[in-house]
Amino acid sequence: MKANYINGRFVAGSAGRPNINPSNTDDVIGLYAQADEAETRDAIAAATEAFPAWACGSLQARADMLDRIGSEILARKDELGLLLSREEGKTLPEGIGEAARAGQIFKFFAGEVLRLRGDHLGSVRPGIEVDVTREPAGVVGIITPWNFPIAIPAWKIAPALAYGNTVVFKPAELVPGSAWALAEIISRAGLPAGVFNLVMGPGRAVGQTLIDDQRVRAITFTGSGVTGRRVLLGSMERLAKVQLEMGGKNPLVVLDDADLEVAVTAAVQGAFYSTGQRCTASSRFIVQKGIYPRFVDAVATRLAALRVGDALRPDTDIGPVVDAGQLAQDLDYIAKGRAEGARLLCGGDELRRDTPGFYLSPAFFVDAHNDMAIAREEIFGPVACAIPVASYEEALAMANDTEFGLSAGICTTSLKHATHFKRHVQAGMVMVNVATAGVDYHVPFGGRKGSSLGSREQGSYAAEFFTTVKTAYTAA
Ligand code: ADP
C-alpha cells in the first residue's frame, strides 16, 4: 500500500483505497492509504513545527530543492505521464504534457524564490523610513481535484514552498497515484521533516480537518462550486486566508468574419480534448448566423473523425470519462439537453471498447438557447452546445450572461471586435483565435464571478496568496 507522508516519514495508516483505471476498470493501479482526522492533525502539527525554521531558512537551499524536484519530474515525465493517464483517463500525450508542465512549474518557482520583492519608501514623517516586505502565510492546506492530478498540485505546492510556507497536501480521492509519485519525489529533495506532508483520504475527513484547524493559516482549493463554498465558509469563520478555483461555463464566440478552420480547431480542442474535463473547457459556442451552418457542419465532421478509446493507446484522441459518477452526470445532462429542445447533432452515446471503461462519444448540441441547463450549468464532460446569434453585441451579452467567469474566447479577424471583447468580456482569461483551455504557467490563472475567489494562481502573482505583507517603520 502507498502510504501517506507525514513529518518526513511514510505512514501506512489503516485503510486503503484502490486506484482504478477508467479506461479499464479491471486494472487496479494500486492501493493508497486513507488518512483520518487524527493523521491529518499530525500532519498539521508537523507543518506547524517545521514552519519557523523553513520560513527563515536559506533561500539558495530552497531554490535548489525546488529545482531538483522540477528536474526529476522532467526527467521522468514519460513515466509520470503514463501513470497520470492510466488513473485519470486523459490521453498519453496530454498526460505526459501535464507531467512536463509540473516540472516546469517547480523550475519556475525555484527562480521565484530569489525574486520576491519588497518596497522601500520615505515616510510622510521626517526622519522615518518605511519598508514593505512579504512574509510566508504559514501552514498552507492544499486541496486539489482529479482533473489535473499533477499540474494543479504543482502549481499550489511549488509557490507555497518557494515563498517559505509549509504544506499539508490533500489530493482528490480518484487520483492518488500522481500525488503520491510527486510526494515521493519531494520526499527526496532535502526538505526538512514536516515542511511538506501528503494526506490522502476523503474530503469530509481530511479536507474538513484542514479547513477547521486554526493552525492552517491559508487554504488553496480547486474543485466544485459546492465544496468551494464549504471551504470558504469554514475558513472565513476562523479568518484563514482562502483561494478558490471552481467551475466555468466558458463561451467561445465565433463571428462571421472568423477563419473557419481556426474556429473549428479552437472549438473542438477547447470543448472535447481531455474529455471536456477541464474547468477552462468551452461548452458554449456562441456563433453568428452567417457562419453558423458551416461552423456546425465542420465541427460535426471533425468530431466524427475523433477516436474515443483507451487513454494509453497511441491512436486515441479522447480518453474515457473519469468514473461512473461523472459518466452518469454527463448522460443526465445529455438527456436534459434533449428534453429542453436542443438538437443533438452527434455523439452522446456510451461506447463499448475492448476493456470495460467509461467511454462516451463527444456530444454536440445545436440550436440551443442560453437559458437551457446545458448552457448554464457546468457539465465537466465532452458535451458542448452551439447557440446562434445575430450580432457581435448579442454574442458579447450572451457570453457574459452566466454565473461563471473563468475563461472566454472569440474567433474573429476583426481587430475592433477582438479588442472590444478582450476589454468587455467578464472573465479572468480571454483567448483570441485560440481555445479557451490551455494556459501558460508563468502568467496568472483565475477567474471572476462564480468561478474564483481570492488572488490569482501561477506566475509571480502567486505571491499575493502565499505571502502576507508587513509594513515596517524605522526612525533613523
Ligand atoms: P470534483 O470532485 O468535481 O473535483 P470536489 O469539490 O468534490 O470536486 O472535490 C475537490 C476536492 O475537494 C477533492 O480533493 C475533494 O476530496 C475535496 N473535498 C470534498 N469535500 C470536501 C470537504 N467537505 N471539505 C474539504 N475538502 C473536500
Image (spheres, rainbow, N blue to C red):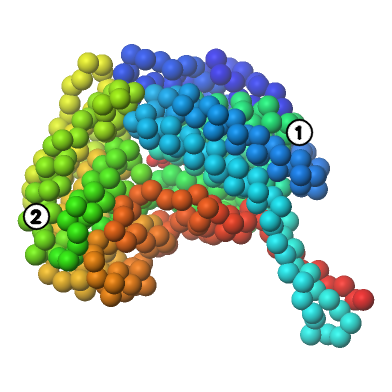
Q: Nearer the viewer, residue 469 or 430?
A: 430
Q: Residue at x 11, y 61 (%)?
A: 291
How far from the left and from the top, in percent, is residue 271? 26, 46
Q: Which residue is mark 1?
A: 192
Residue that mark 2 sits on:
294
Does label 2 point to a residue whose CB lies under 8 Å from ligand 1?
no
Q: Amino acid at mark 2?
A: Arg
Horizontal placement of 355 versus 56: left or right? left
Q: Look at the image and tell me whether residue 107 can be seen.
A: yes
| Quarter of the C terminus within the rendering | bottom right
Q: Give the residue furthest to the right.
A: 476
93 or 197, which lies in front? 93
Check disc 2 and report its element: helix, strand or loop: helix
Q: Nearer the viewer, residue 379 or 432?
A: 432
Q: Position of residue 154 (x, y in %)?
A: 55, 40
Res 72 quadrant in image:
top right
- Circle 2 Cα neighbour tier, 10 Å, few/some/many (<14 / 14–19 / ≥20): few
Q: Establish whether ligand 1 lies closer than 8 Å to the Cβ of label 1.
A: no
Q: Is residue 49 above or below residue 108?
A: above
Specify whether 10 is left or right of 450: right
- Tell me which residue sits at (32%, 61%) in the image: 432
User: Residue 214, relative to residue 84: is it above or below?
Assistant: below
Q: CA distance from mark 1 to mark 2?
A: 60 Å
Residue that appears at 31% across and 52% down: 435
Q: How many other residues sit within 10 Å of disc 1, few (<14), some (14-19) or many (≥20)?
A: some
Between 136 and 181, the residue placed more toward the observer is 181
- Name the spot of residue 296 as percent of width and height, x first: 11, 51
Give the image quarter of residue 48.
Answer: top right
Identify the image quadrant of the N terminus.
top right
Residue 146 visible to the viewer: no
